[in-house]
Image (tube, grey):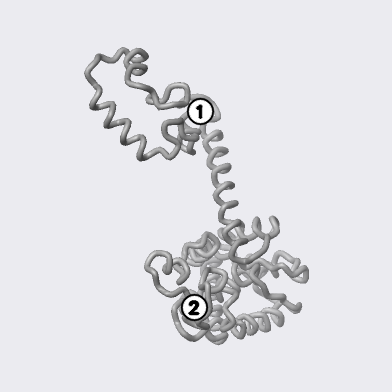
Amino acid sequence: MHMFLEESFASLRSLEEKFGLVRGNDFRYLQLWDFVRRQVPSFPHLPPMGIQDRIVSRGEEGEGRVSDIYKVLMREEGSQTEELKLKWEEELGGEMEDGLWAEALSRVNSTATCARLGLIQFKVVHRAHMTVARMSKFFGIVDKCARCAGGPANHVHMFWACPKLRGYWEGFAGVMSRVLKTRVAMGPGVEIFGVSEDLGVQGEKEADVLAFASLIARRRILLAWRDSKPPKSETWLSDMASFLCLEKIKFALRGSLLGFARRWQP
């Protein structure tokens, strides 16, 4: 930032006077001027401080350095997740409750012990999957769903709003209602994020079971991402049984079979 004096890009003469530079650097200055002009949108004014600038500006030494960096990173993460929430709200056509969004974020790391399943949940919440709506912007293809031929085929449509998925999610709701012994109301909270908007699912155990089961259901949708037919409930149930076996093995290796029993036994 030495090229900016009083929040504006410095002239060559100002730099020569401030730093005692010798004359004859006009061409180099112009090269640097042109580069900064093309790279900094606010040119000739000083750009706003980025996360790296805020960390470096706190100094290199001193007690509490790690704590300060952590606070800066957490504030940055909060602003990024807020932008993410706005994108989901735009596709959903309404506001998401702050409590539901906070629970959706926490479920990224708490839904399953399997790292691959956790990565799936992370990619869903962070909108990392390539939808037809996104590809249409890059490649100019027609923005329509392979299952129902409707559009826009964005993230909300691919996981929840597609009419061809209604039977799949209704089958899921029927099974989970019998398992949890309460009616499971479906909606984008469950089908996209694994978070129930229904007050009937109040206990921690029930919420954990519903989050894990819906993640397995979303995984099956991703495996049939570009298929013309929706996945079948039978395949989801088969996947559920397989992953429960893996979960039990992982709990056993950690010496925590009691924790598995508390979550999954009736």
Name the image quarter holding residue 232. Answer: bottom right
Distance, label 1 to label 2, CA atoms, is 49 Å
Q: Position of residue 136 (x, y in %)?
A: 43, 69
- Quick one: quadrant of the N terminus? top left
Q: Nearer the viewer, residue 89 or 68?
A: 89
Q: Position of residue 152 (x, y in %)?
A: 52, 72
**Helix, strand, or loop for circle 1?**
loop
Q: Position of residue 239 (x, y in %)?
A: 52, 79
Query: Is residue 86 placed above or below 2 in the rendered structure?
Result: below
Say whether residue 133 is visible: yes
Residue 58: numbered disc: 1
The residue located at (47%, 69%) in the rendering is 133
Residue 145: numbered disc: 2
The residue located at (56%, 76%) in the rendering is 217
Which of discs 1 and 2 lies nearer the camera? The answer is 2
Three-letter code, disc 2: Cys
- Quick one: quadrant of the C terminus? bottom right
**Helix, strand, or loop for circle 2?**
loop
Image-based side of 227 in relation to 91, left or right: left
